[in-house]
Amino acid sequence: MDSSINANAEFLVVTSRRRFPWINTVLFALTCCTTLVMGTLLMGEFNRELGQASPSLSEFWRNPSILLAGLPFSLAIMTILFAHEMGHYLTCKYYGINASLPYFIPMPIPPVGTMGAFIRIRSPIQNRAALLDVGIAGPIAGFVFAVPVLVIAMMKSALVPHIPSGDTFSLGEPLIFKIVAFLMGKSAPAGMDLYLHPMGFAAWFGFLATALNLLPAGQLDGGHVAYSLFGDIHKRISQGLVVVLIPLGIFYWPGWLVWATLLLFMGLRHPMTLDDSEPLERRHIWLGWIALALFILCFMPIPFYID
């Protein structure tokens, strides 16, 4: 009798663990749809700017195939976001940390069709080494996929005359953009603008997400890295960042004020790992430098503005 009950209980546990992730799947599918629509809109604007014919999204009901124009953008941005989250997820699995599959956030309005993605970590993290690896794995994976997307986009982008109109939506250029543009001969001379292919916008969004995630505060990816490396000093670093974001928000981009508010709302403390006393290895110090390098390459004081 007892063995039968145990067997049934074990069966229930196994089937529960193998439950199909409906919520994750539905959100992923919806985000594919919203980014596909946004990609179609962006591709239409890109073609019209270059004087090429482009079907309007209003023709969708008569010709659904026009959405294929948005496929490069959708594939690019979903791949970058997926790589970032799977970097976190697979590292969690490596350390035996209970984590969810990625939750994508669809956003059926411009400009990108998504607010990103996240995973839920459901169990404590063993030590600072595991925390640092989990925190940095996502930004590294996303960056590694975003760079070739940017290279492909640069090949398809075009230099056009600069025409200030007062209502043009312009993107800030992170350092990685300037480096790739220079190496590919796409740096815009005076009086010209680089009109970016939609895939380049996907890469730009990936770099922005990387920079925001690497802010060394709270429980952001950068907060995980800062806590792993500096322990109790982490809270002071978080507080210092909020102080820095306020003048950035006042003099450069108001969005930094929103981020400062969000960080204060979410909290600047970081929970302890199960064993904070376990020392880091030399490679973790190098990973900390890599995190700093990625942040410098991706950070933009003014992510976007009206020209």
Image (cartoon, grey):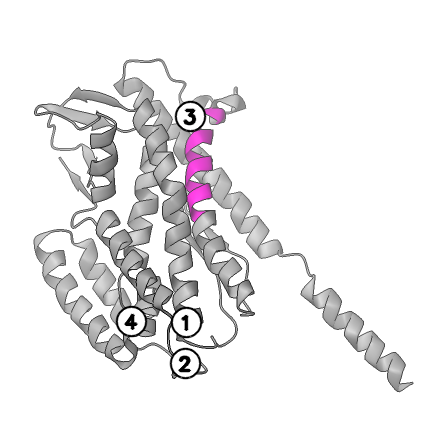
Q: Residues within 10 Å of mark 3 (few under 14, many from 20)?
A: some
Q: Are marks 1 and 3 in contact (CB under 8 Å)?
A: no
Mark 4: which secondary structure?
helix
Residue underneath mark 2: 278
Residue underneath mark 3: 57
Q: Where does the magenta region start and end?
A: 68-81
Q: Magenta residues: mostly which secondary structure? A: helix
Residue underneath mark 1: 129
Picture residue at 31% right of the left edge, 46% below the top = 207
Query: Taking the image as drawn, is residue 197 in sight?
Result: no
Q: Residues within 10 Å of mark 2 (few under 14, many from 20)?
A: few
Residue underneath mark 4: 265
Give whichever of discs 3 and 2 has the lower sequence position.
3
Mark 3: which secondary structure?
helix
Q: How many marks?
A: 4
Q: CA distance from mark 4 to mark 2?
A: 30 Å
Give whichever of discs 4 and 3 has the lower sequence position.
3
Picture residue at 43% right of the left edge, 38% below the top = 35
47 relative position to 182: left or right: right
